[in-house]
Amino acid sequence: MAETTDEGARDDNGSVTLVGAGPGDPELLTLRAVRALQAADIILVDDLVAPGILDFARREAKKMLVGKTGHGPSCRQDEINALMVTLAKAGKRVVRLKGGDPMIFGRATEEIAACRAAGIPVEVVPGISAAQGAASRLGVSLTHRERARRLQYVTGHGSDGRLPADIDWKSIADPSATTIVYMPVKTHAAFAAAAIAAGLDAATPAVAVINATRPDETVIAATIAELPQHLAAAAVAGPAVVMIGSVFARAMTADETSAPSASQAAGR
Ligand code: SAH
Protein backbone atom coordinates (compact mmCIF):
# COMPACT_ATOMS: atom_id res chain seq x y z
CA MET A 1 0.00 0.00 0.00
CA ALA A 2 2.90 2.37 0.69
CA GLU A 3 3.51 3.84 -2.72
CA THR A 4 6.32 6.35 -2.89
CA THR A 5 5.30 9.96 -2.87
CA ASP A 6 7.15 13.14 -3.68
CA GLU A 7 6.65 14.49 -0.18
CA GLY A 8 9.34 13.12 2.08
CA ALA A 9 7.66 13.90 5.40
CA ARG A 10 4.36 12.45 4.31
CA ASP A 11 4.40 9.45 6.64
CA ASP A 12 3.61 11.71 9.58
CA ASN A 13 0.63 13.20 7.85
CA GLY A 14 -1.66 10.21 7.75
CA SER A 15 -5.20 10.85 8.82
CA VAL A 16 -8.65 9.37 8.67
CA THR A 17 -11.79 11.28 7.76
CA LEU A 18 -15.15 9.61 8.11
CA VAL A 19 -17.26 11.18 5.40
CA GLY A 20 -21.03 11.00 5.06
CA ALA A 21 -21.95 10.39 1.43
CA GLY A 22 -25.66 11.04 1.95
CA PRO A 23 -28.42 8.74 0.71
CA GLY A 24 -27.52 8.69 -2.96
CA ASP A 25 -28.02 11.89 -4.92
CA PRO A 26 -24.49 13.35 -5.22
CA GLU A 27 -25.90 16.87 -4.94
CA LEU A 28 -26.60 16.08 -1.31
CA LEU A 29 -22.90 15.86 -0.51
CA THR A 30 -21.66 18.68 1.69
CA LEU A 31 -18.94 21.01 0.45
CA ARG A 32 -16.70 19.63 3.14
CA ALA A 33 -17.35 16.08 1.97
CA VAL A 34 -16.34 17.03 -1.56
CA ARG A 35 -13.23 18.73 -0.25
CA ALA A 36 -12.26 15.60 1.72
CA LEU A 37 -12.86 13.42 -1.36
CA GLN A 38 -10.66 15.76 -3.39
CA ALA A 39 -7.84 15.56 -0.83
CA ALA A 40 -7.92 11.79 -0.30
CA ASP A 41 -5.12 9.37 -1.15
CA ILE A 42 -7.31 6.36 -0.46
CA ILE A 43 -11.08 6.05 -0.14
CA LEU A 44 -12.57 3.07 1.65
CA VAL A 45 -16.08 2.85 0.29
CA ASP A 46 -19.15 1.35 1.92
CA ASP A 47 -21.71 -0.77 0.08
CA LEU A 48 -24.31 1.88 0.50
CA VAL A 49 -22.46 4.64 -1.29
CA ALA A 50 -24.15 5.43 -4.60
CA PRO A 51 -21.90 5.21 -7.69
CA GLY A 52 -22.10 8.88 -8.73
CA ILE A 53 -20.55 10.00 -5.46
CA LEU A 54 -17.09 8.79 -6.44
CA ASP A 55 -17.11 11.07 -9.47
CA PHE A 56 -16.32 13.81 -6.96
CA ALA A 57 -13.21 12.07 -5.66
CA ARG A 58 -9.68 12.92 -6.68
CA ARG A 59 -9.03 10.89 -9.78
CA GLU A 60 -5.69 9.60 -8.49
CA ALA A 61 -7.19 8.47 -5.20
CA LYS A 62 -7.30 4.72 -4.79
CA LYS A 63 -10.82 3.45 -4.18
CA MET A 64 -11.42 0.28 -2.24
CA LEU A 65 -14.80 -1.29 -1.68
CA VAL A 66 -15.06 -2.51 1.87
CA GLY A 67 -18.74 -3.37 2.00
CA LYS A 68 -20.16 -5.86 4.39
CA THR A 69 -23.23 -7.00 2.52
CA GLY A 70 -24.88 -9.77 4.40
CA HIS A 71 -21.81 -11.17 6.17
CA GLY A 72 -20.51 -11.42 9.71
CA PRO A 73 -20.28 -7.76 10.60
CA SER A 74 -17.97 -7.79 13.62
CA CYS A 75 -15.12 -9.67 11.95
CA ARG A 76 -15.29 -7.55 8.81
CA GLN A 77 -15.51 -4.38 10.85
CA ASP A 78 -12.23 -5.34 12.55
CA GLU A 79 -10.62 -5.73 9.16
CA ILE A 80 -11.83 -2.34 8.04
CA ASN A 81 -10.54 -0.74 11.24
CA ALA A 82 -7.15 -2.40 10.81
CA LEU A 83 -6.90 -1.39 7.16
CA MET A 84 -7.79 2.21 7.93
CA VAL A 85 -5.17 2.41 10.67
CA THR A 86 -2.44 0.72 8.59
CA LEU A 87 -2.98 3.06 5.68
CA ALA A 88 -3.02 6.17 7.85
CA LYS A 89 0.14 5.02 9.63
CA ALA A 90 1.79 4.75 6.22
CA GLY A 91 1.06 8.46 5.76
CA LYS A 92 -2.08 8.24 3.67
CA ARG A 93 -4.99 10.60 3.86
CA VAL A 94 -7.72 8.03 4.25
CA VAL A 95 -11.35 8.82 3.62
CA ARG A 96 -13.80 6.33 5.03
CA LEU A 97 -16.85 7.01 2.90
CA LYS A 98 -20.15 5.91 4.37
CA GLY A 99 -23.75 6.04 3.25
CA GLY A 100 -25.93 8.71 4.83
CA ASP A 101 -24.47 10.19 8.00
CA PRO A 102 -21.51 8.38 9.55
CA MET A 103 -22.91 8.89 13.05
CA ILE A 104 -26.22 7.16 12.40
CA PHE A 105 -26.11 3.36 12.34
CA GLY A 106 -22.68 3.64 10.77
CA ARG A 107 -20.29 1.79 13.11
CA ALA A 108 -18.48 5.10 13.56
CA THR A 109 -17.80 4.45 17.24
CA GLU A 110 -15.54 1.51 16.47
CA GLU A 111 -13.71 3.30 13.67
CA ILE A 112 -13.09 6.46 15.69
CA ALA A 113 -11.91 4.39 18.65
CA ALA A 114 -9.51 2.40 16.45
CA CYS A 115 -7.97 5.61 15.10
CA ARG A 116 -7.67 7.19 18.51
CA ALA A 117 -6.11 4.06 19.95
CA ALA A 118 -3.49 4.19 17.18
CA GLY A 119 -2.87 7.92 17.68
CA ILE A 120 -4.22 8.80 14.25
CA PRO A 121 -6.05 12.10 13.77
CA VAL A 122 -9.66 11.41 12.91
CA GLU A 123 -12.31 13.82 11.72
CA VAL A 124 -15.98 13.34 10.86
CA VAL A 125 -17.85 15.04 8.04
CA PRO A 126 -21.60 14.70 8.52
CA GLY A 127 -23.94 13.58 5.77
CA ILE A 128 -27.62 13.65 5.02
CA SER A 129 -29.12 10.58 6.62
CA ALA A 130 -31.58 8.33 4.80
CA ALA A 131 -34.45 9.65 6.92
CA GLN A 132 -33.78 13.23 5.85
CA GLY A 133 -33.42 12.24 2.21
CA ALA A 134 -36.66 10.25 2.30
CA ALA A 135 -38.64 12.92 4.17
CA SER A 136 -37.60 15.60 1.72
CA ARG A 137 -38.57 13.42 -1.23
CA LEU A 138 -41.99 12.76 0.32
CA GLY A 139 -42.41 16.41 1.19
CA VAL A 140 -43.44 15.40 4.69
CA SER A 141 -42.12 17.10 7.81
CA LEU A 142 -41.11 14.50 10.38
CA THR A 143 -42.15 16.80 13.22
CA HIS A 144 -45.50 18.29 12.28
CA ARG A 145 -46.16 20.44 15.30
CA GLU A 146 -49.60 19.13 16.12
CA ARG A 147 -48.96 15.49 15.33
CA ALA A 148 -45.42 14.59 16.27
CA ARG A 149 -43.79 15.46 19.56
CA ARG A 150 -40.92 13.06 19.11
CA LEU A 151 -38.77 11.69 16.34
CA GLN A 152 -37.04 8.37 16.87
CA TYR A 153 -34.64 6.36 14.73
CA VAL A 154 -34.59 2.67 15.44
CA THR A 155 -32.81 -0.25 13.84
CA GLY A 156 -34.75 -3.25 12.60
CA HIS A 157 -31.58 -5.29 12.53
CA GLY A 158 -29.92 -6.44 15.73
CA SER A 159 -26.33 -7.67 15.81
CA ASP A 160 -27.63 -11.23 15.19
CA GLY A 161 -29.59 -10.04 12.14
CA ARG A 162 -32.95 -10.32 13.88
CA LEU A 163 -35.30 -7.73 15.28
CA PRO A 164 -33.46 -6.37 18.35
CA ALA A 165 -34.94 -7.88 21.50
CA ASP A 166 -34.65 -4.69 23.54
CA ILE A 167 -36.68 -2.24 21.45
CA ASP A 168 -38.85 -0.06 23.68
CA TRP A 169 -42.23 -0.95 22.18
CA LYS A 170 -44.05 1.54 24.35
CA SER A 171 -42.16 4.34 22.61
CA ILE A 172 -42.86 2.84 19.21
CA ALA A 173 -46.58 2.70 20.07
CA ASP A 174 -46.65 6.38 21.11
CA PRO A 175 -49.19 8.02 18.76
CA SER A 176 -47.34 11.34 18.92
CA ALA A 177 -44.04 9.87 17.75
CA THR A 178 -42.59 9.64 14.27
CA THR A 179 -40.51 6.51 13.95
CA ILE A 180 -37.95 5.82 11.26
CA VAL A 181 -36.84 2.21 11.00
CA TYR A 182 -33.42 1.73 9.45
CA MET A 183 -32.53 -1.72 8.06
CA PRO A 184 -36.18 -2.75 8.15
CA VAL A 185 -36.46 -5.13 5.23
CA LYS A 186 -35.96 -8.54 6.83
CA THR A 187 -37.78 -7.87 10.07
CA HIS A 188 -40.49 -5.45 9.13
CA ALA A 189 -43.41 -7.87 9.52
CA ALA A 190 -42.27 -8.78 13.03
CA PHE A 191 -41.71 -5.09 13.81
CA ALA A 192 -45.23 -4.17 12.70
CA ALA A 193 -46.79 -7.02 14.67
CA ALA A 194 -44.90 -6.10 17.84
CA ALA A 195 -45.74 -2.42 17.47
CA ILE A 196 -49.45 -3.17 17.07
CA ALA A 197 -49.34 -5.61 19.99
CA ALA A 198 -47.83 -2.79 22.08
CA GLY A 199 -50.80 -0.57 21.25
CA LEU A 200 -49.89 1.23 18.03
CA ASP A 201 -53.06 1.82 16.03
CA ALA A 202 -53.07 -0.67 13.13
CA ALA A 203 -54.26 2.14 10.86
CA THR A 204 -51.15 4.28 11.52
CA PRO A 205 -49.61 5.37 8.22
CA ALA A 206 -46.37 3.62 7.30
CA VAL A 207 -44.26 4.43 4.27
CA ALA A 208 -41.33 2.49 2.89
CA VAL A 209 -38.89 4.55 0.87
CA ILE A 210 -36.50 2.39 -1.12
CA ASN A 211 -33.40 3.88 -2.76
CA ALA A 212 -34.31 7.32 -1.44
CA THR A 213 -32.98 10.23 -3.57
CA ARG A 214 -31.67 7.81 -6.24
CA PRO A 215 -32.98 7.50 -9.77
CA ASP A 216 -34.73 4.23 -8.87
CA GLU A 217 -36.42 5.59 -5.74
CA THR A 218 -39.62 3.73 -4.89
CA VAL A 219 -42.26 4.67 -2.33
CA ILE A 220 -44.75 2.23 -0.89
CA ALA A 221 -47.37 3.76 1.35
CA ALA A 222 -49.87 1.79 3.44
CA THR A 223 -50.93 1.32 7.03
CA ILE A 224 -48.57 -0.27 9.52
CA ALA A 225 -50.76 -3.39 9.45
CA GLU A 226 -50.69 -3.68 5.67
CA LEU A 227 -47.21 -2.48 4.77
CA PRO A 228 -45.55 -5.89 5.28
CA GLN A 229 -47.65 -7.51 2.56
CA HIS A 230 -47.04 -4.63 0.17
CA LEU A 231 -43.31 -4.81 0.86
CA ALA A 232 -43.27 -8.56 0.31
CA ALA A 233 -45.13 -8.15 -2.98
CA ALA A 234 -42.75 -5.41 -4.11
CA ALA A 235 -39.63 -7.58 -3.65
CA VAL A 236 -37.53 -4.67 -2.42
CA ALA A 237 -34.07 -4.30 -3.91
CA GLY A 238 -31.84 -1.64 -2.43
CA PRO A 239 -31.70 0.13 0.90
CA ALA A 240 -35.03 1.06 2.46
CA VAL A 241 -36.35 2.94 5.44
CA VAL A 242 -39.78 2.42 6.91
CA MET A 243 -41.29 5.58 8.30
CA ILE A 244 -44.20 5.30 10.70
CA GLY A 245 -46.51 7.92 12.16
CA SER A 246 -49.53 10.09 11.59
CA VAL A 247 -47.38 12.71 9.83
CA PHE A 248 -47.34 10.35 6.84
CA ALA A 249 -51.11 10.42 6.31
CA ARG A 250 -50.56 12.78 3.40
CA ALA A 251 -48.08 10.43 1.74
CA MET A 252 -50.78 7.76 1.66
CA THR A 253 -53.01 9.67 -0.65
CA ALA A 254 -52.17 8.60 -4.17
CA ASP A 255 -50.21 10.76 -6.59
CA GLU A 256 -48.54 12.85 -3.90
CA THR A 257 -45.15 11.42 -4.76
CA SER A 258 -43.38 10.91 -8.02
CA ALA A 259 -42.83 7.19 -7.51
CA PRO A 260 -45.32 5.03 -9.43
CA SER A 261 -45.58 2.28 -6.85
CA ALA A 262 -46.81 4.70 -4.17
CA SER A 263 -50.14 5.15 -5.81
CA GLN A 264 -50.37 1.49 -6.74
CA ALA A 265 -49.74 0.29 -3.24
CA ALA A 266 -51.89 2.87 -1.48
CA GLY A 267 -54.77 2.20 -3.81
CA ARG A 268 -55.05 -1.47 -2.95
N1 SAH B 1 -25.51 5.97 7.99
C1 SAH B 1 -26.69 5.66 7.19
C2 SAH B 1 -27.42 4.44 7.70
C3 SAH B 1 -26.62 3.18 7.57
S1 SAH B 1 -27.49 1.75 8.05
C4 SAH B 1 -27.61 6.89 7.15
O1 SAH B 1 -27.40 7.83 7.93
O2 SAH B 1 -28.53 6.91 6.33
C5 SAH B 1 -28.10 1.20 6.51
C6 SAH B 1 -29.54 1.53 6.34
O3 SAH B 1 -29.71 2.89 6.00
C7 SAH B 1 -30.23 0.78 5.22
O4 SAH B 1 -30.57 -0.53 5.58
C8 SAH B 1 -31.45 1.65 5.06
O5 SAH B 1 -32.35 1.42 6.11
C9 SAH B 1 -30.88 3.04 5.26
N2 SAH B 1 -30.55 3.70 3.97
C10 SAH B 1 -29.36 4.14 3.56
N3 SAH B 1 -29.44 4.74 2.35
C11 SAH B 1 -30.74 4.68 1.99
C12 SAH B 1 -31.46 5.13 0.86
N4 SAH B 1 -30.88 5.77 -0.16
N5 SAH B 1 -32.80 4.90 0.82
C13 SAH B 1 -33.41 4.28 1.83
N6 SAH B 1 -32.77 3.82 2.94
C14 SAH B 1 -31.45 4.02 3.02
Image: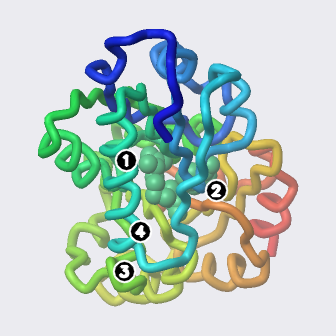
Residue at point 57%, 16% (across, down): 38
Residue labelled with disc 2 = 209
Residue labelled with disc 1 = 147
How far apart are the two marked residues, 2 and 1, measured between alpha carbons? 21 Å
> Quick one: label 1, few (<14), some, or many (20+) residues within 10 Å?
some
Q: Secondary structure at mark 1?
A: loop
Q: Is mark 2 within 8 Å of ligand 1?
A: yes
Q: Is mark 4 within 8 Å of ligand 1?
A: no
- Please state the horizontal and vertical placement of residue 238, each as a whole percent of the image: 69, 62
N-terminal-most mark, 3 or 2: 3
N-terminal-most mark, 1 or 3: 1
- Please state the horizontal and vertical placement of residue 91, each as a whole percent of the image: 36, 27
N-terminal-most mark, 2 or 1: 1
Residue labelled with disc 4 = 76
Report the side of 181 relative to 223 (left or right).
left
Residue at point 41%, 26% (across, down): 93
